[in-house]
Image (cartoon, grey):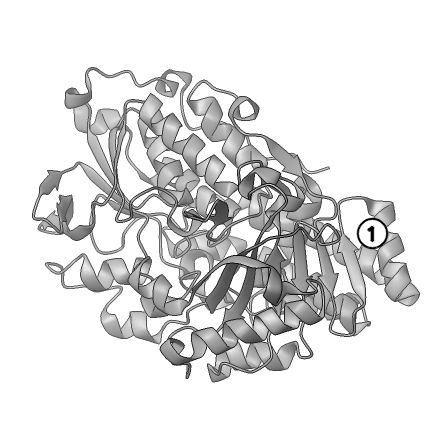
Amino acid sequence: MTTAPPRVPSNLPAATATTSGGPNGNRPHAVVIGSGFGGLAAAIRLAYRGYRVTVLEKLDKAGGRAYVHERDGFRFDAGPTIITAPFLLEELWEMCGRRFADDIDLRPMDPFYRIRFDDGTTFDTNGDEAAMRAEVARLSPADVAGYERYLEESHKIFDVGFVQLGDVPFTHWTDMARIVPQMVKLQSYRSVYGLVSKYVKDERLRVALSFHPLLIGGNPFSVSSIYALISYLERHWGVHSAIGGTGAIVDGMVKLIEGQGSSIRFNAEVAEITTSGRRATGVRLKDGELIPADIVVANSDFAWTHQHLLPSIKRRRWPNWRLKASRYSNGLFVWYFGTKRQYPDVHHHTILLGPRYRGLLDDIFHNKHLANDFSLYLHRPTATDPSVAPAGCDTFYALAPVPHLDGDADWAERAEPYRQAIEDYLGRTVLPGLKDELATSMVTTPIDFKERLLSYKGAAFSLEPVLWQSAWLRPHNKSEEVEHLYFVGAGTHPGAGVPGVISTARVLDKVVPDANVFAN
């Protein structure tokens, strides 16, 4: 089994695990814009390294895409629901002198997901080798050997793409040049679907083994096969969910930050990153308040930050034309609903596949067309945690990948008919009688991502993780425009997904100066 990266980065001396360095006022100040997983992880790491940290959040509570909605006694995780590399969170707790397991009740999922094909056939995934071989054999006995060879290849990709490169800064082209031979050897020029298809022939298995890039905003037919590492990452550490929802982890991180002596301010929207020359000096809030800082870390959307928060800088590397020419991830339509009864036959995580796979993805990513058919991720957290719904009820969300806002959908008109189509489909398949059982309901569309989360084009995962927008070719964690400005979150390296955005904060350890540089 592959050894996980060290929990506390080796480039940090043990002494920096405290907040030593004098009273808060005497410590160099770091401002973090946004409190998604990337921003919260960055705040913890910076305080660990001796910075005085202020986190500024536009919304009324922390989480960003991991915000929690509460309606009529139901609690809904807004976005991320899957934890696949718990050591990344355990590491943050260790930095604060605490044990993750003492604060967060993380439960392994079995199955990881139930995949339901359009013909009603199902395929359960988990981390048990024998059980997975049996599932593959049940669908296609001739593909068992190919499936095992694919897992071996995924393991090799994981060792390079996650273990070796997950926290490499990629601030210079030579960082990329060094890994090109490995990427060629691992066939990174193939798509994830192309790599899977090399090993298995049954189309259902090809779909079941290649859908994972959709979890980070990528088209399985376009993104580099380097993202096949997700398959092994899940198998290596498992798929987990937190009691209390992903929001419980967010709340736990907020408590860590406050316990370090750092502060989080809500309803505090940043209007500008202030600069002197080409050096960040702090931020200006919407209400005009100026907050000076030695460094600024932006967990805000990468494209939005450049277009709106740097008005005083003539951008050389990321002008508007380059931002507009970049490729962005899909949008998301999410229907959150609670039911007056429970559906005990529905697992915690279910993938419901529609009649088309490649055709639907072409419509979403290339044609930017909102089709009448869809595929869904159905989240039923009450399968594991009854506390997120009133007694005897179920909490759900149904998530559909859709085009971002360059597409043809007028969401003001299409949102409700689209929701009704999903309701009808679920009522015919896995949630019989759904229409009459609804207790509460709300939706989000790409418009909400644009207006509420300030996501460019309403893209749910920032830039699409295609090969030419990965590693050194992806926006750097250290700003290419402004000194002492850094980026974390889905839009920078290594990318989207909970492990990805937490790893973007890990990269900061290698590019942000130690606090004593400013203290001296």
> Is 125 in front, or is 385?
385
Q: Quadrant of the C terminus?
A: top left
> Is 248 in front, or is 4?
248
Task: Say which residue appears at 78% left-offset and 66% top-offset.
Answer: 205
Q: Residue under label 1, please give it.
A: 132
Q: Position of residue 233 (x, y in %)?
A: 64, 47
Task: Say which residue appears at 51% left-offset and 42% top-offset.
Answer: 246
Q: Position of residue 405 (x, y in %)?
A: 37, 75
> Is 324 in front, or is 159?
324
Query: Horizontal placement of 224 versus 114: left or right?
Result: left
Is 84 placed above or below 189 here? above
Task: Say which residue appears at 20% left-offset and 15% top-offset.
Answer: 22
Q: Position of residue 164 (x, y in %)?
A: 56, 43
Mark 1 residue type: Met
Query: Horizontal placement of 39 versus 106: left or right?
Result: left
Q: Position of residue 318 (x, y in %)?
A: 26, 65
Q: In which quarter of the view is residue 331 placed? A: bottom left
- How crowded is the residue under tag 1: few (<14 C-alpha within 10 Å), some, or many (20+)? some
